[in-house]
Image: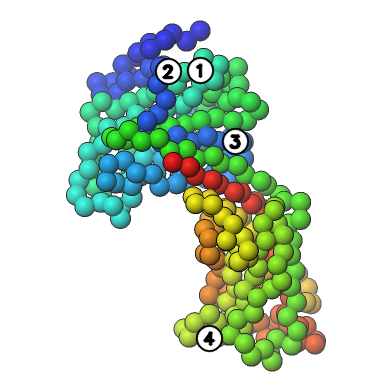
Amino acid sequence: MLKTEKTCVVSDSTITKFGVRPPSTYSMKIQSLSQLKTLFSGTDGYKSRTFSSGKYNWRLVIYPNGNEKDNGTGFISMYVELDSKSLSSNVLAYLTFFIFNKKENKYFTIQDVEGKQFNALRLVHGFPQVLPLDTFNDPKNGYVYDGDQCEFGVDVMVPLTNWEVVSFTQKPTNKKFSWTLNKFSKLKEHCYVSSKFLIEGRNWVLKLYPKGNNTTCSRWLSLFLHLADSETKTMTTGEEIYTQCDMRILDPFGSHHVTLKLNQWHKNTSGWGWSEFVSLAKLEEAYLDKQGYLKVEIEFEVVSTITYSP
């Protein structure tokens, strides 16, 4: 049984304890820890949306498998990153990181009482060893609850509560869309837009530029993924959609497709893709069928709607 407000001094400037007070600056709820670990299993941690404390903007950074580069192997690693755009001079910040324990209905916290200096050379501070993964991952201990959920938080200077709910949908049911452009070499328009296609409750379109989307890319085919106009009009403030997908120009004579992987957040009218997807010389040489048709395909691996509320 955990003791209320039991304190353990880890070092001269670091204190860990359990308490009932929640984070006052920023909180993040992960609805599927296993999917977060899979999607962010490399050397980079998951970065939260930007939140404000004082006159500066910050991000909470979580390494669900530990930050190997900072001696965090075998631990949950947690950091705060200062947005360099809001940096005008050295910034002193006092940091307290939180992990919720539902079994005890309390928060495990680790605090740096001396504070950290953020500057242009050091934008990130935190703790590589917050909790052992063996302790954190065992549902009997209460940090992972209701199947696969967990909560993190941080206090940075000014009390302000923000929430981020993260939900990942892997392998959508209808994950592919194909688009054929007839007689590609005779296309005259600057931009062509596909018909709308529905993926995980959202309508999308592809935008293709036969001779590049700008003058510097006139020898390339440009290809972008956009939310349909009807979707951008209904998105709420703070809502973003994360996608992982493969965009392809299909090889009509074999399996040597041109494939590029897209991993991006979509906001309102923003679209993502490549101005230089494939050169026109390469396309005309190998990627038009005998009738001059061009076949485009997109296959989704992950579609996630993230809603932020202050």
- Image point (76%, 55%), residue name: 174
Distance Cα–Cα, label 3 vs label 2: 22 Å
Quick one: SS at disc 4? Answer: loop
| Camera-nearest label, 3 or 2 | 2
Q: Using the image as rendered, state which of residue 156 and residue 301 is in the foreground.
A: 156
Residue 20, numbered label: 2
Label 2: how many Cα within 10 Å (few below 14, some 14–19, many 20+): some
* Quadrant that contains the C terminus: top left
- Image point (34%, 14%), residue name: 8
Which comes sooner in the sequence, label 1 or label 3?
3
- Image point (59%, 35%), residue name: 31
Residue 31, numbered label: 3
Distance Cα–Cα, label 4 vs label 3: 44 Å
Quick one: SS at disc 2? Answer: loop
Label 4: how many Cα within 10 Å (few below 14, some 14–19, many 20+): some
Q: Which residue is mark 4?
A: 218
Q: Using the image as rendered, state which of residue 83 and residue 280 is in the foreground.
A: 83
Residue 293, numbered label: none
* In contact (CB < 8 Å): disc 1 and disc 2: yes
Amino acid at the residue labelled 2: Val
Distance Cα–Cα, label 4 vs label 1: 60 Å
Q: As displayed, is residue 262 above or below residue 181?
A: above
Q: As displayed, is residue 155 above or below residue 217?
A: above
Q: Which residue is mark 1?
A: 105
What is the residue that sits farthest to the left in this orientation?
89
- Image point (27%, 41%), residue name: 54
Quick one: SS at disc 1? Answer: loop
Which comes sooner in the sequence, label 3 or label 2?
2
42 left or right, relative to 257: left
